[in-house]
Image: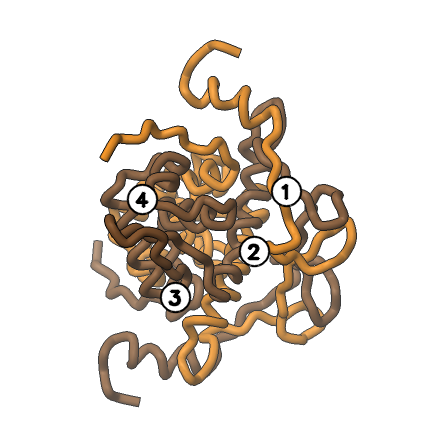
Chain colours: A orange, B brown
Amino acid sequence: MTAVPAEPRICSIARTLDIVGEKWALLAVREVFLGDRRFDEMVKRTGAPRDTLAARLRTLVNAGVLERRPYSEHPARFEYFLTEAGLDLYPVITTLRTWGDKYLAGGDGPPLVVEHRCDHELAPRLVCETCGEPVNPRDTRARRTSGAYSLTATDRGSKAT
Amino acid sequence: MTAVPAEPRICSIARTLDIVGEKWALLAVREVFLGDRRFDEMVKRTGAPRDTLAARLRTLVNAGVLERRPYSEHPARFEYFLTEAGLDLYPVITTLRTWGDKYLAGGDGPPLVVEHRCDHELAPRLVCETCGEPVNPRDTRARRTSGAYSLTATDRGSKAT
């Protein structure tokens, strides 16, 4: 078999996954959404290995998804808060949850129900803002833009434009 | 420091991430959405190590996300197709892409534009199906259900109910 040279697609999905594309990173974000802001609580509620969680939190802070603020000086302890970019991950978290509720819930149904502000159960649906229609993959068509090309050079560390 | 016993949250997000919570798994799913169904093409367009991609594809097939169908007998070769459960991952893929477009695109904008069927650019937005309002994390409240408790025992392999 001839080895095929890799030409990874320049893609916003891949870039996002470089930051949150790992189970413990997204579960840490989930915890902050649920109000668990402290490291030990996150370890307990995610089951993540401490070192791994610490590394993921550093990545999330460096990427501007989480912000840490001190709540104790001696010893130095921090709480984590979602930035605007972090809050914008709510649709990602929600669509993952919805999929799990549909395909992986046991006989008793989903383990967590999210209520919307008018006290009904949140029933998330992805729609197209322009036409208001639900988003169905069969109705879409992907098209590469100039960004796909010029960014290839950047991503490869080349100075060519 | 006292070690805190882990009590991982029983959660549909965690369960979903056990299947797709890894960069190469979601990028493989992306490729199938984009029409690249063959292993070598996926290796080329994702940049994934071959062994890792093969393992992810096995997991995705076993989980019922992808289905493989033979296109050659000698040698045995397969193409991958999305099942209904796989197609239902489109909102996950789309919300990841939208976040990357907003926060990680270069000066030239997003590398890929997705067009909706009426030829406008797809502008995905998560709304609540019941009230039609955009989903804002500040307007939601999570509540544990009986599923969160009874499934704890199951997940731990205990027969207690």
For disc 4, the marked residue is A54
Residue B55 visible somewhere in the drawing: no
A124 over A145 or under it: above or below:
below
- Same chain under badges 1 and 2? The reply is yes
- How far apart are the two marked residues, 4 and 2, measured between alpha carbons? 29 Å
Residue in view at x 37 percent, y 67 percent:
B9
Residue in view at x 31 percent, y 44 percent:
A54
Determine whether, in the image, residue A4 is placed left or right of residue A150.
left
- How far apart are the two marked residues, 3 and 1, measured between alpha carbons? 26 Å
Crowding around mark 1 (Cα neighbors within 10 Å: few <14, some 14 to 19, many 20+) is some
- How far apart are the two marked residues, 1 and 2, measured between alpha carbons? 13 Å
Residue A152 spot, x, y in % from top left: 48, 23
Q: Nearer the viewer, mark 2 or mark 3?
A: 3
Q: Amino acid at mark 2?
A: Pro
Residue B88 spot, x, y in % from top left: 52, 62
Crowding around mark 3 (Cα neighbors within 10 Å: few <14, some 14 to 19, many 20+) is some
A53 over B150 or under it: above or below:
above
Image quarter in which the N terminus of chain A is found:
top left
For disc 2, the marked residue is B91
Q: Chain of mark 2?
A: B
- Mark 3 and mark 1 residues within 8 Å of each other at the beta carbon: no
A45 over B49 or under it: above or below:
below
The numbered dot on residue B64 is 3
Q: Nearer the viewer, residue A75 or B29?
A: B29
Residue in view at x 44 percent, y 53 percent:
A37
Residue B62 spot, x, y in % from top left: 32, 64
Q: Which image quadrant is residue A41 in?
A: bottom left
Element type at mark 3: loop
Residue B23 spot, x, y in % from top left: 38, 45
